[in-house]
Amino acid sequence: MEGLIHAIFGSFLAMTPMGVLKMVIMWAIGGTLIYLAIKKSMEPSLLLPMGFGAILVNLPFSGAITQQVGGMVEEGPLSVLFDMGIANELFPLLLFIGIGAMIDFGPLLANPKLLLFGAAAQFGIFFTLLVAAVIGHFSPEMFSMQDAASVAVIGAADGPTAIFVAIYYGTQYLGAIIVAAYSYMALVPIIQPPCIRLVTNKKERQIRMSGAKAAVVGKKVRVLFPIVVTVVVGLVAPRSVGLVGFLMFGNLLRECGVLNSLSDTAQNSLANLITIFLGITVSVKMQADLFLNVGTLLVMGLGLIAFIFDTIGGVLFAKFLNLFSKEKINPMIGACGISAFPMSARVVHKMGLEEDSQNYLLMHAAAVNVGGQIASVIAGGLILNLVQK
């Protein structure tokens, strides 16, 4: 009987009380992510596999991850997938092809100046980089400059870019960064409205903007746009070519008009498959010993700061332009300069209707939101140029 008990519960008996506690905490975190995905529909395509993966990798002597057993190394499937698709940055880049194929840059091309809001809304990234660098200066064992750069990109609300930058720098906080990035993306409807109200008044939120341009953007412009953006950004920030290039390649598949089947595959099959692999594989970095530390709490806090200041930065930029513009801009659309497309645009449109039932901001907000996707990728590339590996 004793042998049977040992055979069944031996893995638990071999753990220390602290190890058991950490394991249970990670199970709770995994369960919470699954709950948010299913019950609250918060980024379910990523939070659900991440939550399940967090449970997988925190089972005693889990066979899902590579470990040493009896002097021999046994490879786990999740560790193998991590090395094949995340450690070499492949999964995030492939996901960018799908994202590019999904995005219609038409509203932005009809009103190119709205791209400026996307640039302004990246303020939080560089502000948080400065804050994290200061923390690292006083606690170098906790935060290196590379860690600070990786954490700052959370503010872009662009999960793949955050993953790409974090992997590039090999930060120890990869798991926390991914959880923070996608959690805050899912919380856009909760985080952004109070931030917008904090820096605007009712009169500003009621500003009506003229209807979005109805001019049809020609096919030639749509085809040239991803090519030109890739070349220009590649010359300015060469290290971002992987990010921007894959995003724009996906958009070129969409706009060329002769590869509809490939565009559909990129938007659906490829994006869905990579999302599944990405979500469950990143859990390798959610092992209790790697995840449960003070640094993780700092990452979550700094990520929230970056997200908030990105939102506020875009709004304040719109207010600044209104000082010199005859045709006033509703400053709320500046908040859409983050990369959470189309959630942020919907949030701002809803807020506009709450202030004035005839104030339709969706097309303007969507154009800024699309511009934010480009700006966030470029910002990630600039971070790679500014901070040495």
Image (cartoon, grey):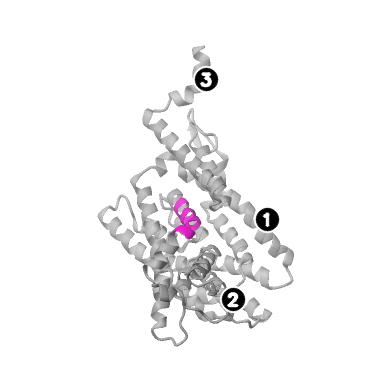
Q: Which picture quadrant has residue 91?
A: bottom right
Q: Earlier in the sequence, mark 1 or mark 3?
A: 3
Q: Which residue is mark 1?
A: 269
Q: What is the CA distance from the residue labelled 2 to the residue labelled 1?
A: 26 Å
Q: Looking at the image, can residue 254 be seen?
A: yes
- Tell me where the magenta segment starts and ends, as one range: 179-190
Q: What is the CA distance from the residue labelled 1 to the residue labelled 3?
A: 43 Å
Helix, strand or loop status at disc 1: helix
Q: Which residue is mark 2?
A: 107
Q: Amino acid at mark 2?
A: Pro
| Dot 3 crowding, Cα within 10 Å, few <14, some 14–19, many 20+ | few
Helix, strand or loop status at disc 2: helix
Image marks 1 and 3: residues in contact by CB distance under 8 Å: no
Q: Earlier in the sequence, mark 2 or mark 1?
A: 2
Residue 2: x and y in percent read: 49, 13
Q: Which picture quadrant has residue 335?
A: bottom left
Looking at the image, residue 217 sits to the left or right of residue 364; the answer is right
Residue 317: x and y in percent read: 40, 76
Q: Which residue is mark 3?
A: 7
Residue 201: x and y in percent read: 39, 72
| Magenta-colored segment: predominant secondary structure | helix
> Can residue 149 be found in the magenta stretch?
no
Residue at the far left in the pictured view:
138
Helix, strand or loop status at disc 3: helix
140, 219: nearer the viewer: 219
Q: Amino acid at mark 3?
A: Ala
